[in-house]
Image (cartoon, rainbow, N blue to C red):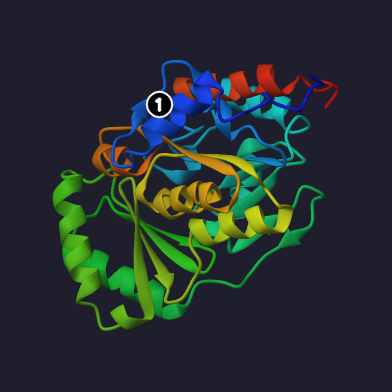
Amino acid sequence: MRPGEGRPLSDTDPVHTDVRRRLEEPTMAIPVHEPAVLAPALRRPFGLFVNLNGTIAPIAPNPDEVRVAEPARRALLQLVDALDVVVIVTGAPVEQAHRLVGIDGILYLGNHGAEQIRPDGERRLVGTADDRLRRAAEDAVRRVGERKVSIEPKGRGIGIHFRSANNPRAVRKQLLAALQAGEHARHYRLVEGRCLLELRPVGERDKGDAVSEVLTERGIKGGLYIGDDRSDLPAFRAVRHLRDSGGFGIAVGVANDETRDAITDAADFLVDDIPGVVRILNWLTSTLGRPDSSR
């Protein structure tokens, strides 16, 4: 087998058969003890889609404090030339994602895909946030009256961070109520992350739309999406749709206390935090071949 070809598959392959059988129960996520159970997804062209915060970068109280875990970065660096496409998918601004990961040759999809930095460095950026979204966020924060809440412009959206609040669960409920009752509510939809509420313009794309476009554009037949929060759920559905179109896609959820139930219900497999993600990335490197490390 040449480097990059992946593991040959057949309907009688025991790993393939076992995964197929277990995936017939989509409501039951399966813990990954050995990453090799992901082998059925290794079809070419192959795409790896990885969320940023909470998946390869520990969640931080302040967006400015986010740092990508070095083992994850090293693993991604090894994979850029081994895979058909490596994609970082995030709700953060695309320039921030590019700066944090710092690897050329990756496709960066920021602000849920509304901003892109292509592997060749081409930037496809869109405008700033709708002013009504900013006013709605400011009004909701003001009504809740919690000082340890911050507002972050996110391309065409607005993010409200409440991780540092004295009672994040209570503040989340208060913010949701205020936003849903706001005078501009018809102009935005809410996307929930980990201690984060995002206001996105009505009709704006989500991570699922962004991933679907890449799958179609590149003719991807095998894919993995790794994510940790509710905003990743549309992307889970997008990559799993490969099963209905002659390919094989698997959604890998990063278990955490904040979104465990939603992720468990939606993902095919679960890993525990960033070390579990790194284990998968390292397995992909060893399975698909190690490129030149001259970058």
The residue that mark 1 highlights is 273
- The residue under the point 29% across, 53% down is 149
Q: Is 56 on the left-hand or right-hand side of 202?
A: right
**Can residue 269 be seen here?**
no
Looking at the rendered image, the quarter that the C terminus falls into is top right
**In the image, is residue 160 above or below residue 66?**
below
Q: Is 82 on the left-hand or right-hand side of 90?
A: right
**In the image, is residue 182 above or below residue 164?**
below
Amino acid type shown at disc 1 = Asp
**Can residue 36 be seen here?**
yes
The answer to which of 123 and 31 lies nearer the viewer is 31
Q: Within 10 Å of the Cα at label 1, are there few (<14), some (14-19), or many (20+) other Cα atoms? A: some
Residue 188, image quadrant:
bottom left
- The residue under the point 16% across, 57% down is 173
Residue 263, image quadrant:
top left
SS at circle 1: helix
Whole-percent x and y of residue 107? 69, 48
Q: Is 246 on the left-hand or right-hand side of 183?
A: right
Q: Is 139 on the left-hand or right-hand side of 250?
A: left
Residue 177, image quadrant:
bottom left
The answer to which of 162 and 82 lies nearer the viewer is 82
Whole-percent x and y of residue 109? 61, 53
Whole-percent x and y of residue 223? 59, 40
- The residue under the point 45% across, 79% down is 131
**In the image, is residue 255 above or below residue 159?**
above
Whole-percent x and y of residue 6? 70, 26
Looking at the rendered image, the quarter that the N terminus falls into is top right
Count of number-bearing discs: 1
